[in-house]
Amino acid sequence: MSNIAVIGDKYSIIPFALIGAKTFEVESSEEVIKVLRDIIKEEDIGLVLITQNMMQSVQGELEEIMKNRSKPLISMIPSAFTESKPINVRKLIMEALGFG
């Protein structure tokens, strides 16, 4: 069974911690890359959600890290301080688990 990991600021990751996701509080792009490299080593992580402000700061490095990998699925989510359109998290989770 695949698990979910969430990377972002402490306010954005709290709801995910409440539903049992592995959460990683970060404050810089360097921390995001370090945490992401650690997460990739874990075989049980199927979906990584990264807050929008953090994702934008590491886009180039992220593409390089994931260039030859199909797992985990990485997606951007709005942070607690970002205005954006809602995403279908259920659909992302189902895809990460192999049902989509």
Image: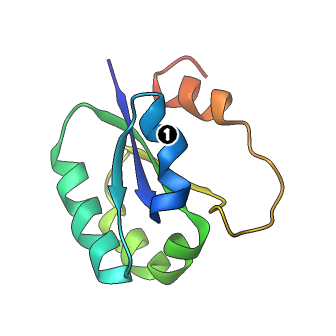
The residue at the point 20 percent across, 35 percent down is 43
> What x and y, as percent, mark residue 73?
45, 44
> What x and y, as percent, mark residue 17?
42, 39
The residue at the point 66 percent across, 29 percent down is 91
User: Left of 14 or right of it: where is 81?
Assistant: right
For the residue labelled by badge 1, is the local secondary structure a helix, a strand or a loop?
helix
Asked if 62 appears above or below 48 in the picture, the reply is: below
In the image, 71 versus 81, the foreground residue is 81
Asked if 13 appears above or below 83 in the picture, the reply is: above
Quarter residue 46 falls in: top left
- The residue carrying pointer 1 sits among few (fewer than 14), some (14 to 19) or many (20 or more) residues within 10 Å by Cα, namely some
Asked if 96 appears above or below 55 in the picture, the reply is: above
In the image, 71 versus 22, the foreground residue is 22
User: Left of 34 or right of it: where is 20?
Assistant: right
Asked if 14 appears above or below 93 in the picture, the reply is: below
Indicate the quadrant containing the C terminus: top left, top right, bottom left or bottom right: top right
Please state which amino acid type lies under the numbered disc 1: Phe
In the image, 52 versus 97, the foreground residue is 52
Q: Which residue in the protein does label 1 denote?
A: 16
